[in-house]
Image: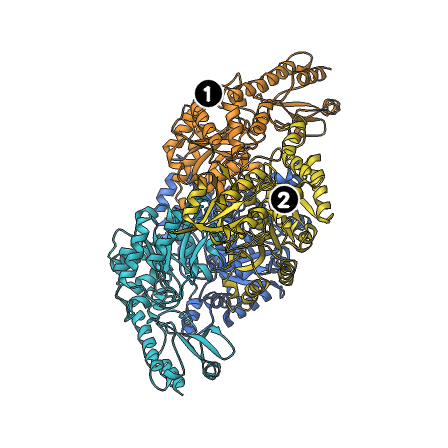
Chain colours: A yellow, B cyan, C blue, D orange
Amino acid sequence: MTSFASDYLEGAHPRILERLFNTNMEQTAGYGCDAHCENAARLIQQACNRHDADVHFLVGGTQTNATVISSVLRPHQGVVCASTGHINVHETGAIEHSGHKVLALPTDNGLLTATEVEEVFHSHYTDPNIEHTVQPAMVYLSFPSELGTLYSKQQLTAIADVCHRYHAPLFIDGARLGYGLASPACDLTLADIAHLADIFYIGGTKQGALFGEALVICNSNYKTDFRYHIKQNGALLAKGRLLGIQFETLFEDGLYMSLSKHAIDAAMQLRSVLLSEPCKSRYSMPIDGLTNQLFVEMSNYDYERLSKNFSFEIWQRNQTTCMVRICTSWATTQQAVEQLAKALSL
Amino acid sequence: MTSFASDYLEGAHPRILERLFNTNMEQTAGYGCDAHCENAARLIQQACNRHDADVHFLVGGTQTNATVISSVLRPHQGVVCASTGHINVHETGAIEHSGHKVLALPTDNGLLTATEVEEVFHSHYTDPNIEHTVQPAMVYLSFPSELGTLYSKQQLTAIADVCHRYHAPLFIDGARLGYGLASPACDLTLADIAHLADIFYIGGTKQGALFGEALVICNSNYKTDFRYHIKQNGALLAKGRLLGIQFETLFEDGLYMSLSKHAIDAAMQLRSVLLSEPCKSRYSMPIDGLTNQLFVEMSNYDYERLSKNFSFEIWQRNQTTCMVRICTSWATTQQAVEQLAKALSL
Amino acid sequence: MTSFASDYLEGAHPRILERLFNTNMEQTAGYGCDAHCENAARLIQQACNRHDADVHFLVGGTQTNATVISSVLRPHQGVVCASTGHINVHETGAIEHSGHKVLALPTDNGLLTATEVEEVFHSHYTDPNIEHTVQPAMVYLSFPSELGTLYSKQQLTAIADVCHRYHAPLFIDGARLGYGLASPACDLTLADIAHLADIFYIGGTKQGALFGEALVICNSNYKTDFRYHIKQNGALLAKGRLLGIQFETLFEDGLYMSLSKHAIDAAMQLRSVLLSEPCKSRYSMPIDGLTNQLFVEMSNYDYERLSKNFSFEIWQRNQTTCMVRICTSWATTQQAVEQLAKALSL
Amino acid sequence: MTSFASDYLEGAHPRILERLFNTNMEQTAGYGCDAHCENAARLIQQACNRHDADVHFLVGGTQTNATVISSVLRPHQGVVCASTGHINVHETGAIEHSGHKVLALPTDNGLLTATEVEEVFHSHYTDPNIEHTVQPAMVYLSFPSELGTLYSKQQLTAIADVCHRYHAPLFIDGARLGYGLASPACDLTLADIAHLADIFYIGGTKQGALFGEALVICNSNYKTDFRYHIKQNGALLAKGRLLGIQFETLFEDGLYMSLSKHAIDAAMQLRSVLLSEPCKSRYSMPIDGLTNQLFVEMSNYDYERLSKNFSFEIWQRNQTTCMVRICTSWATTQQAVEQLAKALSL
């Protein structure tokens, strides 16, 4: 059985494990105040071309989202996002738990538009009962989106412009940032992200690390006292160097982007198969994102047939068809890709 | 200038003021532990035919909603409501401030349906990632709704059935409860409400009192320690007897329902005018609720014309037309109704 | 039976009731946006000699404390207060409910000292694990304290200096502010309070109003968006004019201070009796505040004897003695004072 | 430089790293729903002799404390603990951030007594203003305490009895549980802890794992929906098997207790040296806990001298003396112990 169910099925890239092994008996200060974290932060500043940014390492995405958002917002403020946004649907209300409304905008493709975001702010600030409604004060988006779609540089710039106009920070969830940047459809670089976002993070968990998200705070307004928030949210890892070591490994010679590219290559191979004969009449991809997540509609018959040897995540299902997510990752083997390609074509 | 902008424009019914005057120098215990509150609670139990219910008096609607909902829910739980629900759009995120997601369902007419509510629960409990999503655990609805519409006995019973099936309390916001019960379209009594709801309240603020909402907890599961929650939410009025005295006055001889009926009569007179010549071609009522709120679409020209002598709340507006809310209340005079009827017809 | 149990036993000063009666059928905008609130705010600015201050009207003390504190603090910050502080012991954890730790300092007399407050800040900022501890970021004190004691101008200035040095606002709970200012032991004026505090409030509930606290925000840093916080905390009274009308009455011609003086006169009469023969050997006043609250230690025998005709609040009790609080107010009659004086002396 | 500053200086026991290496390319379900977590849970149930208990794996102590406490308490309830308790002083107010007051009792030795805890409940339930104060509803204690002291079986049983009488769960923070159980002064077993506590956890972070705390919920009242809380608190590790694998390794053949014993042996060696000539006149141990933490008072001269080759955590310091914490762990080498013993004696 080979699984394409998610991008966090395996442990970590072997070089990361090896580095953990080699540093194991070093004695270091706790809570991220060690040389590995410092070095990793410096490497990430370089990769982002933002030497002024603060870099922090947290364990997972939900805790990073909750920590950032609750550190930025005042109690009467909310965060704008797409209705499909991870914070809106897959974090058990962690944002509301910290006291804030998620102002979700309907979407078909997982993306916000600058026009929609502008409208949220505009309608708030022209509401005669303004104080009776939650003040939109931050924009959250995922790059790539939860549906594997991407913002173009122009789209993201337009959203950032709206944010700046309303003094609302733009926060980018980059749990799969590398898989977005490595997409053939992407016209943005890591430095562009770091230029446009006020705060963003570079996901490790889904991109070759055991766990860990590297948070980059670009806008100085949001840097003050941030480590208190990490601690308060239970996100300050005692042996913080474990995060430093992993991100050092990922960023010292380009491993992060080469692993990202590996996953995208695998996904693009599968996509080609799906779009060509004999597959194209049996499968469709209603959301055509060019990242490591392929959303494929197929008959339940095909799904059952494939499930004998492969596993996927079911996204939607009715009595005759289902949409599954086929997910590749840094760990996907060429052999697995070929086996699935063959099975799809049968 | 006569205002039909809301139902909380004036002070209180003269009998309430008189009673406050007559009891002014009594010395009573604070925080609702006085004979007036006890008496008012007893009168309300009688009116509801629920002698087992706990009755508490709070100052306003938002604080009542937040207090009740945060006392009932555990942190991972959310409250289902219509997208137009007061807690979703007009309380500055008070529910989220207490840590809970509002699970809002789209609506055109301000009402939930049992089918929609059932679907929320069903899809939650069949979600393979159940623990990653907020657990629906309570249903909030307003009677009448924020758009002046009403649930029939059958509709409300069906929703209550879904709630019971999923062990989720049904909480009814009755800020305008009397105006709903007095509607010619209503087939529910106060006792029916008290039978179907686990928790509900009888609004005073909009119905003849200076302020105050009488909360009725019918289901014993939600009674324990409730006064702690009132205090914690800043809703325990020091001179609680002010609430007791007002509700005594409203409930000792039917004043509450006769004031409700007064407002409905005024609204129905205006509705008749709007539906007949010469008005019917110039005004429309896309949401035709038979309570004290009339939502009337008119040309901006008519709106400007009427605004010289009357004020309304603008609900929506575009370049040529607007929808206004015309609101009657316990305090609306027959003279004001006739003046507006005449102006509408000009 | 005459009660000296608290200062919120009666309704309101007759002039307030009369004004409510006279304005009852005025139609005004809701939520504090009416001419009465504007006028009351202006009168309070004048009385405080702070024409730059923002004035808001809330219903009660607990809600005012919670609203102010949660509007000022970021999530990792706490509020310093005396262990006897109302927010620490009598608000059912309302401050913690909004997410913040109350950093309580032990006290015997209900007062903070500048030295103690300085030490809290100093020890925090020199802690090597600074981010693992709550950041002190605000100082809360009550004037008079919950034990009826007062800060001198020098003491309060010293505390304010510490606050400014650490950029932490000084917030003064003035639920009984008038009773403090009218004390013969007080060397501070309302204008001094408004000069030293960043935020404070003038209590109405215990000082002649039916209810209501007038919040004065002196420091501009804390003014932004404050009405959102009022609404979110369920503290925005629909018929806000009720608050405006009451504070207009209290502040238009000095009624507030004359009622305060009345209560203090009554307390000082009783205090004289307690300190002179034949009382001085039977009663003691371990906490000798010169405000409207007298804390009197007596035998249980005397307590039981007095309880036949008077009620007090028991503060502490053991098998032979008890300490009771004797509370006067704007409503205390000369007759009641004389009766109690006589009974004490028997 | 050899550090005795804490027990989380190194990575993990080599067998844990080896196991992570060997399982690295396994594909497993996420979020703790894998065979390693199941197996680890079963092993821990066995070790605790509580086959009915629920076992969950979280990443760190602060997040475990916050998740457990906020899952148990209703909004008006607080948690009782010693003033030295980790939740009171070293978690940046994480408990208050979730809305609850920490009811801290003064202590000299880090321990609660049953009498003190009883008094908290008793005085609450006899308070005439009961609803104005936070309801004590849970007891938190650390075993060993933050000062390295231990409860005897009798003491812990007495506290548990009070808890049961007031229907308040006893929650034991076992971040260093093994170091407590392995102490020569301990008369409790892991099974005793699991019998007396309603909820407790077995620390991995400080006891040989890279990270991780194994939470054991013994009382069924607190099991419902717990995984929602883990997720909401950002504590549900995506690659949950990393926790399962570590605890499998620690519990399949007694590694956890043998590592604990190793640390205690090292501490007892150092303690013997400190208590004998020539040390006993120069060093004192005012808090004499027999666990892996030694609190040693020494002259600043000695401290500076030792600091050339060793590091410790400074607990308190004045102009002439300081108290340092000397911490051993699973990773402390015999060589390091001997070098420090020698240096202490010089």
Work out whether residue B134 or residue D131 is closer to the camera in this orientation and state it.
Answer: B134
* Residue that numbered label 2 is attached to: A260
Asked which quadrant contains residue C109, the reply is top right
The amino acid marked with disc number 1 is Leu
CB contact under 8 Å: marks 2 and 1: no
Q: Nearer the viewer, residue D342 or A53?
A: A53
Q: How many marks?
A: 2
Which amino acid lies under the numbered mark 2 shown in the image of this protein? Ser
- Graded by Cα atoms within 10 Å as few (under 14), some (14 to 19) or many (20 or more), the crowding at tag 2 reads many
Quarter of the image where one finds residue D179: top right
Q: Quadrant of the C terminus of chain C?
A: top left
Where disc 2 sits, the SS reads helix
Q: Residues within 10 Å of mark 1 (few under 14, many from 20)?
A: some
Residue C187: x, y in percent? 61, 54
Residue C239 vertical placement versus D294 (above, below): below
Residue C184 percent coordinates (x, y): 56, 54
**Residue D270 as seen in the image, left or right of residue A273:** right
Does D157 sit above or below residue C141?
above
The foreground one among A76 and B78 is: B78
Q: Secondary structure at mark 1?
A: loop
Question: Which residue is tagged 1?
Answer: D188
Q: Is residue A322 above or below residue A115?
A: above
In the foreground, D315 or A314: A314
The subunit letter for the residue under badge 1 reads D
| Disc nearest the viewer among 2 and 1 | 2
Residue D53 in sight from this viewpoint: yes
Q: Measure the alpha-carbon separation of dots 2 and 1.
A: 51 Å
Residue projecting furthest to the top: D277
Can you give x and y, in whole percent of width and height, for residue C172 in the image? Answer: 57, 53
Chain identity of mark 2? A
Q: In the image, is B170 to the left or to the right of D298?
A: left
Residue B324 in the figure: left or right of residue A81: left
